[in-house]
Image (cartoon, grey):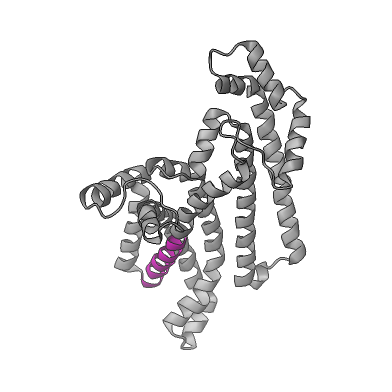
């Protein structure tokens, strides 16, 4: 097991190196534009050339990349070319904001999806149609429209929640909860629409299997059959869907953060891309690849725990 974990983490590191290398090669064509942006449109070509030399951007591209990589593996991801702030702490700070929205939304998505999926698959009939209708609403209503409606109702009219902004948990836990409530609701509704349908389909397949009929003939209770047997076997595919849902939420954080003016990872990446802030873009890319690797690894380990046949060594 330990060797498997190390292999997966090693593969993640290699992937991060390849992705950041490709990213750096693509960004290297814009050194002149970035220098011009920093200095302003009135800067002369000589001044721009001096800045490029001062930043070391006139060196061979591959030398620059491995110089960045050498420092990155030691935890030094450089500094922003615009703010001069260290990239590593800045990315972690923004990542914490994004995760404070995604993690609660993902937990709520899992709980509600499992409830709706199991409820629909085990009861059928009207209950099944109601559960599918709830999921369908999440598909039909765009997240942006839902966000606007919730802001109008709960922030503008009722004034229960703030329309925009973010309060750190350490500063005021109550204000933190209020600041993330609407974004979490928006992400949860979209997540449930996808995951509940997956859980329902998998549970229906499990409940039709021969071993379920055998358990019923032996007098096992419906609750025991559904919870202890069918749900446990259906949980493995659901975990895979959950990891994909996390990645989807993480990738879609940009929209949520821009709508609610949250200083998160997505908005940070978007602004860095617009500015051509090369060290920040590289840091964001590396952290993103490693985060996805860790999430997928945790999903595989959880699948192995739920299903011994899927365990890896």
Q: Nearer the viewer, residue 14 or 37?
A: 37
Residue at horizontal 61%, vertical 41%? 87
Confirm whether residue 189 shows in the render.
no
Q: Nearer the viewer, residue 234 or 258?
A: 258
Q: Is residue 259 above or below residue 40?
A: below
Compared across the picture, whether 84 is left or right of 5 comes to left
Residue at horizontal 62%, vertical 41%? 86
Residue at horizontal 32%, vertical 67%? 127
Q: In which quarter of the view is residue 299 placed?
A: bottom right
Tell me where residue 139 appears, x and y as whole percent: 37, 49
| Image quadrant containing the N terminus | bottom right
Residue at horizontal 70%, vertical 24%? 54
Q: Nearer the viewer, residue 6 or 88?
A: 88
Confirm whether residue 283 shows in the render.
yes
Tell me where residue 217 appears, x and y as whole percent: 48, 86
Q: Nearer the viewer, residue 264 or 253?
A: 264
Q: Residue furthest bottom?
A: 219
Compared across the picture, whether 39 is left or right of 188 comes to right
Tell me where residue 134 appears, x and y as whole percent: 33, 58
Q: Which secondary structure dominates the residues rendered in magenta?
A: helix
Q: Is residue 174 above or below residue 24?
A: below
Q: Is residue 78 above or below residue 175?
A: above
Tell me where residue 313 appears, x and y as whole percent: 75, 66
Q: Does residue 110 show up magenta in the picture?
A: yes
Q: Does residue 5 show up magenta in the picture?
A: no
- Residues in magenta, as a range: 107-123
Compared across the picture, whether 152 is left or right of 24 comes to left
């Amino acid at each position: 097991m330990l060797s498997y974990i190390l292999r997966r983490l090693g593969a993640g590191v290699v992937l991060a190196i390849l992705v950041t290398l490709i990213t750096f090669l693509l960004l290297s064509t814009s050194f002149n534009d970035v220098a011009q942006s920093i200095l302003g449109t009135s800067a002369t070509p000589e001044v721009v050339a001096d800045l490029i030399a001062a930043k070391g951007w006139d060196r061979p591209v591959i030398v620059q990349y491995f110089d960045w990589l050498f420092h990155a593996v030691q935890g030094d991801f450089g500094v922003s070319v615009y703010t001069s702030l260290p990239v590593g702490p800045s990315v972690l700070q923004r990542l914490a904001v994004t995760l404070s929205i995604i993690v609660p939304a993902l937990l709520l998505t899992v709980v509600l999806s499992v409830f709706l999926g199991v409820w629909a698959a085990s009861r059928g009939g009207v209950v099944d149609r109601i559960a599918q209708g709830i999921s369908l609403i999440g598909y039909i209503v765009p997240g942006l429209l839902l966000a606007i409606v919730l802001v109008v109702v709960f922030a503008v009219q009722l004034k229960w929640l703030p329309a925009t902004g973010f309060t750190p948990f350490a500063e005021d836990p109550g204000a933190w909860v209020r600041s993330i409530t609407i974004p979490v609701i928006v992400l949860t509704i979209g997540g449930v629409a996808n995951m509940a349908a997956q859980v329902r389909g998998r549970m229906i397949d499990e409940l039709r299997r021969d071993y379920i009929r055998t358990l019923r003939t032996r007098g096992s209770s419906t609750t025991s059959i559904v919870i202890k047997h069918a749900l446990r076997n259906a949980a493995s595919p659901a975990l895979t869907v959950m990891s994909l849902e996390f990645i989807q939420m993480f990738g879609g954080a940009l929209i949520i953060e821009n709508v609610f003016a949250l200083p998160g990872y997505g908005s940070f990446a978007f602004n860095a891309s617009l500015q051509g802030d090369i060290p920040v873009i590289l840091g964001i890319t590396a952290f993103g690849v490693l985060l996805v690797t860790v999430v997928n690894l945790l999903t595989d380990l959880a699948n192995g725990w739920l299903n011994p046949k899927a365990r890896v060594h």
